[in-house]
Amino acid sequence: MQALVSQTGLALRLAFRNPMGLLYGFLFPLIFLAAFWALYRYEEVPLALHMGELLTVTVLGGACFGLATTLVSERELGVWRRYRATPTPTWVFVTAILISRYLLIAAAALLQLLVAFVVGMPVPTDPAGLFVAFTFVTIAFLSVGLVIALLADNVPAVQALGQCIFLPMLMIGGVAVRLSALPDWALHVSAFLPGRYAVAAIQSCVTGGGLGDRGFDLFALLAIGLAGFIAGVTLFRWEPSGRRERRTNLIAAVAAVSGWVLVGLLAHAQGRIAAPVTVLEDVGSVSDYVAPRVATARPDTPSDVVASSASTVASEAAPHVAAPEQGISRPEPAPAVRPAPTSWREVTPADFDQVAFDRLPSDDGLVAPVARDGQEPDLAAVDQLERVRAALPSWPPGRVADPVQRVRNLLYVAAVPDLLQMGEIERFLPAIVLERLSAEFSRDELARILFWIATHPLEGEDSAIGQLETAGLPGVSGPTRAVRGRAMLYAFKLLGRLTGQLPARPDTPAPDAAAQP
């Protein structure tokens, strides 16, 4: 153990004496952070949705370039030859190098997180899980860097091999380009690459629910890491000119690739190919936003509804007095609960009073955002918003005969971009959707339908979610429950604007200016 600690300390001292290594290890992660900050500067919570990508890039660069370049350059300079002459076992030497590189990568990631906190990123939802996920990610990529170092004969060869891993991982591995933006063939390829599992595991600990549902991601990273280390042990050589038998090279190649292939095949077999969506938090259920039903009426409730409710309350909820002939008093029954409507046509303004609009997520938050008064979209997003506005009148799902399904489909136009965190346009789409709905329905009808959809989010069909491309938006595949949850929130928010319970937003029709049938 003493030899391992001593060798690790020596490896760290040598690393800090390498200016180029420090440049790649600490400056480049900050450059990537600045680039992501500039790219997603309009998001309300800075960098929170992209720490999985940023930390994965940091680990990937530190392993594929930092570790591999250090090992090959030291081997070329004869440093390894001197290590070999010492009584220190080979496993101590290799383990010390990997531990020191882990500490360097962890220091670079910590610096990246500190800068992100300074610019406004909140504390991760699961810090302990983030440490575990980061460790698994580092194990996987350090094994890749070890194989690169033992395959390459010189530093230029390291750069070439490293780029062969680094660039595909960024472009089609779910690291720099989100999986939701990739074509179908790239999603199938990404299942064999560790990048998508690294991003998913880390991101879940930063903005999601932690590692509770990330067991497969951790397994994939561990399997790829173990396969890489087995290949590294098979390929190990002390001298830069060391040659191995063809059989050794073949065994090492099979060992290195086996983990990637195994993970990819399992992902296909378990149906894990579709692009996952970034769910920042549970949107809750209907009961979180609708109070228990009581026999009350609004001042503007139609008189027939008031009369009906009053008669029900009078007959069923009036207190009973003592019965003279028996000399006893009967207990007062509980207030009558007004029955829930059985269709959208039975919804009344009294039902709107049951909605706790103050419990809805903030319009400026990450979930179900709505543009503030006077807030203008970025110039790059204006054209896309106009294309969506122009496409909605003829969009087939927005023309179905059933009025409830028609409104539900149009709500998906706002819900899907929210779920995909399309920061440039998502907060401006609710006004476009409300504009379209107001052209189709009267204010009274629309309010009733929105309430019905908000309180019945799992009814109806959701095939429109996969037809958004014809409306100028990306569709999603896989489970649609999360999309329905966002549609529920937008139904509540649009209802609040129609009834005056929530403040109006740009382009939101005033209640007295809504279209009439």
Image (spheres, rainbow, N blue to C red):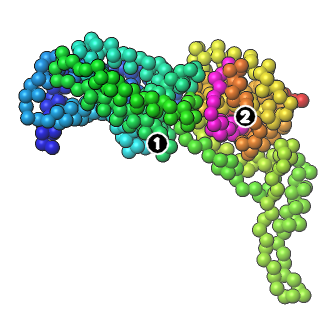
Q: Which mark is residue 462?
A: 2
- Residue in view at x 81 percent, y 82 percent: 329
Up/down of 316 relative to 8, above or below: below
Indicate the quadrant where residue 497 lies: top right
What amino acid type is highlighted by mark number 2? Asp
Q: Are marks 1 and 2 in contact (CB under 8 Å)?
A: no
Q: Residues within 10 Å of mark 2 (few under 14, many from 20)?
A: some
Measured as percent of width and height from the top left, residue 225 is found at: 35, 33
- Residue in view at x 39 percent, y 36 percent: 223
Whether residue 481 is in magenta: the answer is: yes
Indicate the quadrant where residue 20 lies: top left
Measured as percent of width and height from the top left, residue 398 is found at: 78, 26
Whether residue 190 is in magenta: the answer is: no
Say whether residue 467 is left or right of residue 381. right
Measured as percent of width and height from the top left, residue 205 is found at: 44, 40
Where does the magenta region start and end? 472-493
Indicate the quadrant where residue 64 lies: top left
Determine whether the residue tagged by mark 1 lies in a helix, strand or loop: helix
What amino acid type is highlighted by mark number 1? Gly
Measured as percent of width and height from the top left, residue 40 is found at: 49, 23
- Residue in view at x 84 percent, y 81 percent: 322
Task: Write down the residue under mark 1.
Answer: 215
